[in-house]
Image (cartoon, rainbow, N blue to C red):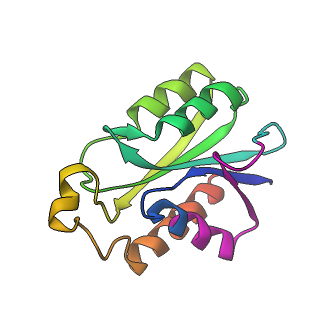
Amino acid sequence: MKTAILYESWHHGNTKKLCDAIKKEYDVVLLNVKEDDIKLEEYDLIGIASGIAYSKFYKEIEQVSKEKMTEGKNVFLMYTCGKPGQDFAKSIKNILSLKKCNVLGTYCCKGYDTYGPLKLIGGINKENPTEDEIQGAVRFYSEIISKL
């Protein structure tokens, strides 16, 4: 089974830490939406990983998902954010629904956040994602592939 994780992680690299930990233990291809040529047809499983801005996945990863996602793919979602609690994946799930994709699960954890006024106080969640949260992403991926 060929797996790619499409990611966008530019603020503090929080989401990239999750992707790198999965890549270290599993044979996955990491595709940076800002740097790589995105072709998803050849993959059986696609992860979409992002930080959160304005209560949803980063704009560019949503746009790439609209334009490049192949219909009917198995997909999993991961994100980091300053304050987990609500479903910040709602918008990307709507995009994937239109593409008839099967969303197998979502993983979320805190990330270091200095966006907007948080910058004035030095940010929040400076220690996040923790090693336990990073390993949680690896366990999440393991659970996803065990479903297939």
Nearest the viewer among 148 and 16 is 16
Q: Is residue 114 visible?
A: yes
Q: Is residue 24 magenta?
A: yes
Q: Is residue 72 visible?
A: no
The image quadrant of residue 101 is top right
| Quadrant of the image containing the N terminus | bottom right
Picture mark count: 0
**In this view, 27 is above or below 49:** below
Q: Is residue 56 left or right of residue 43?
A: left
**In this view, 77 is above or below 109:** above
Q: Please tell me which residue is depicted at 77% across the width and 39% down the height of the picture.
A: 40
Q: Please tell me which residue is depicted at 51% across the width and 55% down the height of the picture.
A: 9
Residue found at the far right of this picture: 42
Q: Please tell me which residue is depicted at 84% across the width and 42% down the height of the picture.
A: 42
Please give the range of residues in magenta.
18-37
Residue found at the far bottom of this picture: 131
Nearest the viewer among 113 and 144 is 113
Residue found at the far front of this picture: 120
- Place of residue 87 in the rendered image (x, y in percent of width and height, measured from the top left): 32, 40
Q: Please tell me which residue is depicted at 36% across the width and 61% down the height of the picture.
A: 109
Q: Is residue 58 magenta?
A: no
Q: Is residue 52 left or right of residue 145?
A: left
- Place of residue 50 in the rendered image (x, y in percent of width and height, measured from the top left): 49, 49
- Place of residue 104 in the rendered image (x, y in percent of width and height, measured from the top left): 55, 44
- Place of residue 115 in the rendered image (x, y in percent of width and height, measured from the top left): 28, 53
Residue found at the far left of this picture: 121
